Amino acid sequence: MVNMSTDSLLTDMTSTPVMERIFSATEQVQCMLRFEAALSSALEDCGLTPAGSSAPLQALLSVDFLTPERRDYLTASARDSGNLAIPFIKLLTDEVRRSSELAARYVHMGATSQDVLDTALVLQLKEAVENIQRGIEQLKSACVSFTIEYAATIMPGRTWLQQGPPVTLGLKAAGWAAALSRHQTRIAQMSSRALLLQFGGAVGTLASLGTDGLRVSAALARHLDLSEALLPWHAHRDNIAEAATALGLLTGTLGKIARDISLLMQTEVAEVFEPSGEGRGGSSTMPHKRNPVAAASILAAAIRAPGLVATMLTAMPQEHERGLGGWQAEWETLPAIFRLTAGALALCNETVTGLEVHPEAMRANIAATHGLTLAEAVGSALTPDVGKQRAHQLVEEASREALQKCVPLQDILAANSSITQYLSAEKIAVLLDPRNYLGSTTKFIERSLGQATERED
Amino acid sequence: MVNMSTDSLLTDMTSTPVMERIFSATEQVQCMLRFEAALSSALEDCGLTPAGSSAPLQALLSVDFLTPERRDYLTASARDSGNLAIPFIKLLTDEVRRSSELAARYVHMGATSQDVLDTALVLQLKEAVENIQRGIEQLKSACVSFTIEYAATIMPGRTWLQQGPPVTLGLKAAGWAAALSRHQTRIAQMSSRALLLQFGGAVGTLASLGTDGLRVSAALARHLDLSEALLPWHAHRDNIAEAATALGLLTGTLGKIARDISLLMQTEVAEVFEPSGEGRGGSSTMPHKRNPVAAASILAAAIRAPGLVATMLTAMPQEHERGLGGWQAEWETLPAIFRLTAGALALCNETVTGLEVHPEAMRANIAATHGLTLAEAVGSALTPDVGKQRAHQLVEEASREALQKCVPLQDILAANSSITQYLSAEKIAVLLDPRNYLGSTTKFIERSLGQATERED
Amino acid sequence: MVNMSTDSLLTDMTSTPVMERIFSATEQVQCMLRFEAALSSALEDCGLTPAGSSAPLQALLSVDFLTPERRDYLTASARDSGNLAIPFIKLLTDEVRRSSELAARYVHMGATSQDVLDTALVLQLKEAVENIQRGIEQLKSACVSFTIEYAATIMPGRTWLQQGPPVTLGLKAAGWAAALSRHQTRIAQMSSRALLLQFGGAVGTLASLGTDGLRVSAALARHLDLSEALLPWHAHRDNIAEAATALGLLTGTLGKIARDISLLMQTEVAEVFEPSGEGRGGSSTMPHKRNPVAAASILAAAIRAPGLVATMLTAMPQEHERGLGGWQAEWETLPAIFRLTAGALALCNETVTGLEVHPEAMRANIAATHGLTLAEAVGSALTPDVGKQRAHQLVEEASREALQKCVPLQDILAANSSITQYLSAEKIAVLLDPRNYLGSTTKFIERSLGQATERED
Amino acid sequence: MVNMSTDSLLTDMTSTPVMERIFSATEQVQCMLRFEAALSSALEDCGLTPAGSSAPLQALLSVDFLTPERRDYLTASARDSGNLAIPFIKLLTDEVRRSSELAARYVHMGATSQDVLDTALVLQLKEAVENIQRGIEQLKSACVSFTIEYAATIMPGRTWLQQGPPVTLGLKAAGWAAALSRHQTRIAQMSSRALLLQFGGAVGTLASLGTDGLRVSAALARHLDLSEALLPWHAHRDNIAEAATALGLLTGTLGKIARDISLLMQTEVAEVFEPSGEGRGGSSTMPHKRNPVAAASILAAAIRAPGLVATMLTAMPQEHERGLGGWQAEWETLPAIFRLTAGALALCNETVTGLEVHPEAMRANIAATHGLTLAEAVGSALTPDVGKQRAHQLVEEASREALQKCVPLQDILAANSSITQYLSAEKIAVLLDPRNYLGSTTKFIERSLGQATERED
């Protein structure tokens, strides 16, 4: 019977097919098999086992090892033995024995359960990290294109959910791209620490290999194309936990992008929309709605990741040479973080790539506040003459009057001699034109694009 | 193609078959179907739909609705539409239409996606909570039996991981039972709040049912055997989040029990062991070990649950009438909490039921400290004569001497005239007998058992 | 030197003066003193200590015990001894000795450090819980008044941040009130479990009191006006952790209220505003803004509480009779949760009490969508004739046309014979009037108010 | 009145004096003042303000700005205005005005509240990070010395809390040192991202500075000796959150060290002890105990940090140009993480530096298992002849017999012809000598020390 226990109808929403494959039972077992095959080769290379004793394991790499029967056996036995490796080694040894009694004698020699389980995880992580990095690169490229396209598209800046002076849509996207660029660096630095062979034997001394431990370790690392650690890291989980924190940080940025988009999609704002399409974002009861469905899933990921990251950190103080409870707590948690992040990343890629932009709504929203969001420009212009606080006060009073009377700020200002003694009506009009109050927007965009492009080389 | 994406070989370790079934895709869809069938009956009861229009939905309840094709369709469409309900209603309406065009017109009438999804969740939770309560009752009973059996089995009390005065194993188990009893009450109180119908229509006004909303709601609740809420709770998730916190608290207690057992199983302590058995707790490299495998999984659950509970709390501030991101973050999180808790509860039940007790090791461990853990008894006996601080000081000095010289404390004390002027050697011997220093142990056990038994009635 | 180490300029924003007092060093020490004084009385009551030996401790209750010197001593010594109780007992014994050498002999007799620390915490919690319950009652009352006042004030319902059919502001507030009512019940139930005496001596057996333990315990509980536990709960923290979860749940609801308000305050929405006032919500650079400052602090509390609650749950699996690390992790965490919650509750009270409502903005926002948010009403009216899916489709097409042409939905519908064959233009106009599409709003409000009032009795 | 609200008697235990100073109100205000003074200089440098207008602010740097009156004003006003910067700028402008009306006009020109608050935080973090790095370096050095001293001190290796084959105490400490080395790299990489100037004005465009924004920004960064960001990071918190994750990871490692030590200090193990000393680790009721008091505080920090890190990640999706709630959630959280980590680091330094080692207890604990923990050596020796599974089985049976009969494994093995046909009694004795079963221990230590030393250069 196929184990359909944790089946879910939401995996397309909260993960990706690639990530599901990487962290599937099949792939996990395959990576465990790769470890054992590589170990058998390393032992043979080092002359510790007879010539040819690795062949049967190598042969198994091209077979679908995880039959339904074995799946059931592993699931049931894992519970009793406390981990997957013990029943796996038993199945593997039995299978090897069918082709060679001799080879069967050396299966798993020198290794402990955690060696195969951790290294299999690292092999899975290696592919998962590459997949995430590709996803970030795509999203960053989309943000860069978007930045260029909308570099001069003026929209309200917003702070504390209130309109402030204008920004451009390109500046907003440049901020997204810059953050993604940092995540690429962060994940690369993490990878150089985390993607390491685990090989220490029972208590991290490789004692059962006598004086040959490091030679076997080097050969094993070579076969698996992994770097070696300085010493086994069975109970030191900082690198593995860092993989979690790096993805948690990325998910936070994806959540920020999604939050921005969902707020801009609000009925009353309507400046930017997720791409539409057949069956996308419809509501069963409100046919006219354009629900931010991708944003909802991305935000959900950003809400879920922190708790999972906390679990990985909580699990770190593992006992002695190999711990109890902490290690086990990682098993389903780290894959969950990768799944969630990959799912959010894929949705974010689709979203940013197909974003609908409504510049006219942006202009209308700026205009709706009667020029109040440009008040700062007038304040700044007044500062040299009257000082910051007095300027602030004058503009604040004028703004209140404009609000109360529902009249353009420009009219109020032009009628106030305390202001016109320093600023002419024409000057006021220029000051209140959003195009004239973008400050260093273009320079920030250029600086940011320069760096993003550089990085791509 | 069957979706095997989130398949895992660990579900037997981190969940139970029953809980996997309750939160399976099949059961979720069945509960959604139950909602829609009950709604069609309620509408018909209230005369809002033609007689007989609910029959086709009722008929579907005994059919296996979630075919592989529909599973694939739901998974793919959920991603685009942002939730499962929209494609489900489409499939359902199509299916109903095959038997009755008329009935198809009224499918899902008055309801919104969240009504069916939340109510289906509540139906799943109802069964899940009953299962958890049964599991607690069993574990409590096992703890009560254990308490009675070992009420007088003396073992070292331990604080800060250091031996202190003696306790009995029964007292320890009585503490477990008392905590479990509180969890039963807590979960029952939570259930009365959380297991409620969700029915509000698009924005919680049941507007599309005109003035008939509450009548339909009452009928619907009756059909599903659920209580009604005062008003729809689409964006108020305190009850749902409380289900998470109640289970999180329970998992903490299970973790405490597992931690105690794992520490008592240490090679150097060896007082209590998890039940052994074929393939249980063996180590692939250390054949003689008795690994606390159940304890490891339970502790892992106790490490994982808090982060998941935090997610449920973080998700609570949901926007307006129905939120964005927060609700979605709950979907996989709350089932994960139930799975983990049920898995830990089942393992804890097996463990406590089959616990091996080594009273001789307990006695030996007490004896190994030369009587130092009974020092307090001597201090207490001296207090009336010399005061607490002086008594403390005298005993501390004697204890240090006993430690340094590796001599029984009794000998040191009996040789110290500052002490013997108040306590005879015989009195000292009596004071240092662990059986005489159990204080209110028996009374605490009796009081606790009285309450536990009462509750069972 | 006064320890000003963790001083912060943000305590008014993230806490309240009352809660700061309750969890101040002074109050903690006073509560520890109350425990020791009550213990001395209980011992004397039970005839275990000479008559009059409790008098010196009772006398200290009216003295400011925590002098700056003692504060410094406690802070420094707590680090070395691992808790506050050891140096506190030393200071206390020294002080008692000044008035009575005899009384000094019995200070803390029978108790362990954790007895005094946990019970002092419970005494602090008792006052803190009462304060929180009063705050909830006030906020609920404000919500109830608000519900009554705005029961018929129509505003857009919003789901997924998109406008849907109308609700009333009163319905929204009724949802807040109902949640607060549940929190009152929840906290009351938690209190009956958590506010218990801790008294067990070194390992929870009260061994140093011989056979008198339970008599002393009963007397001690009576003196402190606390209930007794069935047995000491040194390493069973479910009740204490439940205090954290109960407040975490409350903070989630406060966050939901704050999120609603902050979204309604958006420049483009402008339907509801936090109370204004001197220096309130101003921006240093944008003089016209009305920042949701209270909402920001409340949301910050709702973001912070879950992590703190997770800490309390993580700390639960405490070792043996008294744990190591877990207990210590609670010390600053639980007070932090109470501070944050009280601060958010106070701000929420001020906010809801002074909320500015702009019904004209609500009407304008509904109107801005050309009637699309009432489309569901038309769909429902069509359903009996054409079925749900066809009705949905007809309305969806009309809505898209209205959106594209920027024309009222009413006009599009009235021009479509597929629709007018079932609904007259007059009927369509009635259907699209928001006042006619409130469904069970009034009944939900009444039901909810009935329950809220009942509870107040 | 001095605000003593959040005063605590535990700061010496959960923080350090240096970290308390860095994150004190006084230091925060001083860093805000440094920002404003540097800004005034930058503006003057760039010719945007009259010569001499920065002098009054520079003069304030050497004054104790935060008087008790101002402290009270700031605390009260922060609540109303939503942040500290607004009332601070007001106080500052008033103060500057006393010496120069002209200078007062330009205070804070071009900046927004978040610019000064974030940059002040970065200035505090800079010092805090240096302090943490120094602490790690000291601890790593202590671990390196310890590794060298105890490189050959044999003790039981332990996995799943069960004794396994032997390790050396030096190997354990080498693992600690290697992890600390990685944390140094990690924190350095984080610092290069996080310790950046924040300067963007109201919405991150520096609009009020016209075209001079970047020139002022460069000058400001120079004055503060900070690097510039590519563009303002008001709502992109990945770098700040990474500071939290980096410390969270470190705290996990400290927790691992503390857990090891606390387990080794158990009464029944007694292999390693925290340094003792006056009043250190004593128990009020159990005079003979040696409580792991430093370990308890370090473990408490490791339990608390993950929840705080999760808060920082949860806070990341901040709205638009400057967010609401998320930013505010960081304010007390990030300092709390630094305090906790520094406190744990200091305690860990004291602990490792003064660790008491009992090699005789280590030998006795190994001996207590009758040689069973060396069983693997025999299994490995048998493997070439009989295969891994058969060897495992033979040794497992012998081990069970030794356990049951309480006889040395050596005797059982030597009496079993299935074994002696491959291994002589002499060979068995050699195999069961722990000194001969350390495998690559020495090489791992050397490799690890080589890297640690390299890094120190």
Image: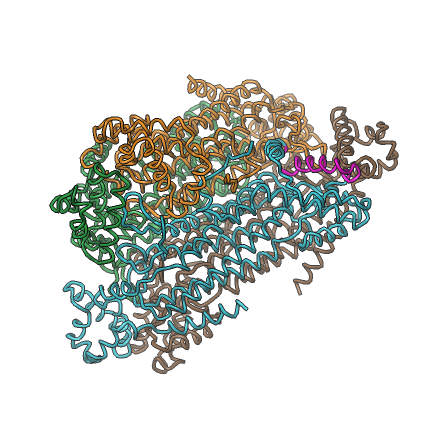
Chain colours: A green, B brown, C cyan, D orange
Q: In this view, does C11 lie to the left or right of B454?
A: left
Closer to the camera, B107 or C221? C221
Q: Position of residue C353 (x, y in %)?
A: 42, 60
Could you tell me if residue B414 is visible in this image? yes
The image shows a total of numbered marks equal to 0
Residue drawn where x is 27% and y is 35% of the image: D106
Q: Where is residue C109 in the image (x, y as percent from the top left)?
A: 75, 42
Work out which quarter of the rendered image holds the N terminus of chain B and state it: bottom left
Q: Is residue B27 above or below residue A138?
A: below
- Magenta region, main secondary structure: helix
- Residue B97 occupies which quadrant of the picture? bottom left
Seen as rendered, the residue at the extreme left is: A426
Closer to the camera, B175 or B106? B175
Q: Position of residue C20 (x, y in %)?
A: 53, 46
Q: Is residue C449 above or below residue A319?
A: below
Closer to the camera, D43 or B76? D43
Q: In this view, does C45 lie to the left or right of A82?
A: right
Residue drawn where x is 64% and y is 56% of the image: B140
Q: In this view, does A128 lie above or below C427?
A: above
Work out which quarter of the rendered image holds the C terminus of chain B and state it: bottom right
Could you tell me if residue A73 is visible in this image? no
Residue C90 colored magenta? yes
Residue A456 colored magenta? no
Closer to the camera, A47 or C276? C276
User: Range of the magenta residues?
Assistant: C81-105
Q: Position of residue B93 (x, y in %)?
A: 31, 70
